[in-house]
Amino acid sequence: MNEYRVYGDMLSGNCYKVAMLLEFMGVPYDWQAVDVLAGFTQSTEFKQINANAKIPVLEVTHEESGDKEYLSESNAILNYLAEGSTFLPASGLPRGRVLQWQFFEQYSHEPYIAVARFIKLFLGLPAERKEEFASKQAGGRKALAVMDEQLSRTTYLVGESLTIADISLYAYTHVAADGGFDLTEYPNILAWIARVEALPNYLPMRARVAS
């Protein structure tokens, strides 16, 4: 079996989603905690594994050769890890719908909810960014409404079982209140969050530390 190491920050939804999947799959991995605010991702050392200077990064050590390869972008990592498992449909429309929700997460959800959370939680809502924070609210509420409507019809986002579509969107949705979003307005999302958290091997966001 290949060996995995994840470079990430557990308070980052994009990093957390990778740890979530690995825990759900029962796959062993090392967690290398990275402090983005301290500037490590901008170092020459880190840019050798990801020139884009962002986390998460998955380090894959191949079992037979011992060679190391690196993969970045959280949803790409999820798709790689989930291949051949129940967390990613093998083909057809179900697989397409997983990708649909992952693109939704990156383009219609994360730019609003995650950015609002960062401004408020990590930066303390500074005066010079209050206007930007306010501008994220309508887009975030729209994304949550789209999810809530889907979850009124299906147990999970792509049918009746958990997929990486759910993991992609759970990561920032369950902490949306940190960005000023009131999840009590979305009862189907709250029920979905409770279902995810009741699953075996569920990993809370703040539970993983450096290995």
Image (cartoon, rainbow, N blue to C red):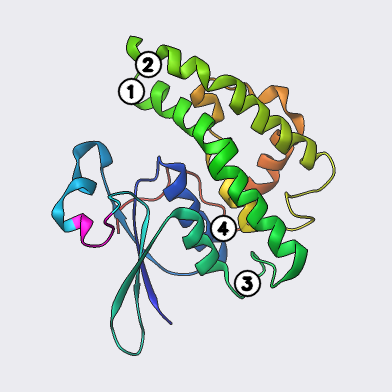
Amino acid type at image mark 1: Leu
Tell whether 9 sits left or right of 38: right
Q: Main secondary structure of the magenta part?
A: loop
Q: Which residues are magenta?
A: 46-51
Q: Give the number of the mark in front: 3 or 4.
A: 3
Q: Earlier in the sequence, mark 2 or mark 3?
A: 3
Q: Which residue is mark 1?
A: 123
Foreground mark, 2 or 3? 2
188 inside magenta stretch? no
Classify residue 180 as left or right of residue 188.
Answer: left
SS at badge 4: loop
The residue under label 3 is 85
Residue 77 showing in the rendered view: yes
Nearer-the-camera pick, 45 or 25: 45
For mark 3, give the secondary structure: loop
Q: Is residue 50 above or below residue 170?
A: below
Please tell me which residue is depicted at 69% across the width and 68% down the height of the picture. 89
